[in-house]
Amino acid sequence: MSPLPAPPSPRIARFARVLPRWLMLAAVVGLSACVTTPRPAPPPPGPPVTDLTTHAALERALTGSHRVPAQRERDVYRHPLQTLEFFGLREDMAVLEVWPGAGGWWTEILAPVLRDHGHYYAAQWDPDSQSKFVQDALAEFRAKLAAHPELYDHVQITALQAPTKLSPVAPESLDMVLTFRNLHNWLARDQALDMLHAMYAALKPGGILGLKDHRADPALAVDPKATSGYVNEQFAIELAQQAGFELLARSEINANPQDTRDWEQGVWTLPPVLRLGDKDRAKYLAIGESDRFTLRFMKPRIAPTAVRSAP
């Protein structure tokens, strides 16, 4: 018979009794740390930036044969590439343009760029309107789209017009809303805040509003109706902020220092309208289109009304 092993020393026996308790305690502490210690949240992404792929797509659209020659001639005044890159357009975005009009000047650029990877929504006037102007304009816009299905087949026509049509898309479904030289129209009808609230509701948190309009002389008193077609820039900023937007940046891309903004027929004295006809036509053509502000806003990622609890 083999001899029995010698009993462990008191020190080893005591260590053997204590070790399981240490192992269990370490496991509990480790598990507790995994459960109760939250990972630090990643910083929120910054405003969107136009990537190289979108830049190339914009250049192709701008030089495409589908563009109406008379519309292409206005690039020198409207700076479409620089303007859209200032707003941070990307080809994978869901973008709503408010009131592209009958001619769809920006549609010729935006729709081809967003066709394959994004979404382009054309928010026109109320299709139930009895206005002949509206009905003719909508028919002209649809005919434009039908002429180039290879570019415009994915365009989704919707409506945004106060007070009847204020939900052009599902809430918080858009990455960007763009509107060009329309704010003065809404001011004239006391509809600007309603329209801005509708755009705010349609944007995702962090979504971008790109706003451009004719700039009034800041030395003059603010005209809340913008009867001359010119809008006070600071007044426009405050309106957008009142609707909940945060101003990110302003740009002088579309400035025109030759526009003195004191014309007989307001902004419509200048091209492309040339309301005075042949009177001083050469003078107004030499000045070019109006002086314009270009503003980039964001819908905050956290609602301004949210209140954080004290730590």
Image: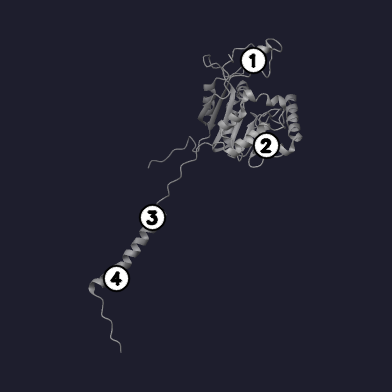
Given residues 140 and 185, the one toward you in this image is: 140
Q: Position of residue 285 (x, y in %)?
A: 66, 15
Q: Earlier in the sequence, mark 2 or mark 4?
A: 4
Mark 2 surroundings within 10 Å by alpha-carbon count, few (fewer than 14), some (14 through 19), many (20 or more): many
Marks 1 and 3: which is nearer the front?
Answer: 1
Q: Earlier in the sequence, mark 3 or mark 4?
A: 4
Mark 4 secondary-structure assignment: helix
Q: According to the image, label 4 marks what residue?
A: 16
Q: According to the image, label 1 marks what residue?
A: 286
Given residues 231 and 284, the one toward you in this image is: 284
Query: How far apart are the two marked residues, 3 and 2, measured between alpha carbons?
Result: 52 Å
Q: Position of residue 10 (x, y in %)?
A: 23, 73
Q: Earlier in the sequence, mark 1 or mark 3?
A: 3
Mark 1 surroundings within 10 Å by alpha-carbon count, few (fewer than 14), some (14 through 19), many (20 or more): few
Q: According to the image, label 2 marks what residue?
A: 112
Amino acid identity at mark 2 = Pro
Query: How far apart are the two marked residues, 1 and 3, measured between alpha carbons?
Result: 72 Å
Q: According to the image, label 3 marks what residue?
A: 33
Q: Residues at badges 2 and 4 in contact (C-beta under 8 Å)?
A: no
Query: How far apart are the two marked residues, 1 and 2, measured between alpha carbons?
Result: 32 Å
**Could you tell whether 169 is left or right of 304 in the image?**
right
Q: Position of residue 269 (x, y in %)?
A: 65, 14
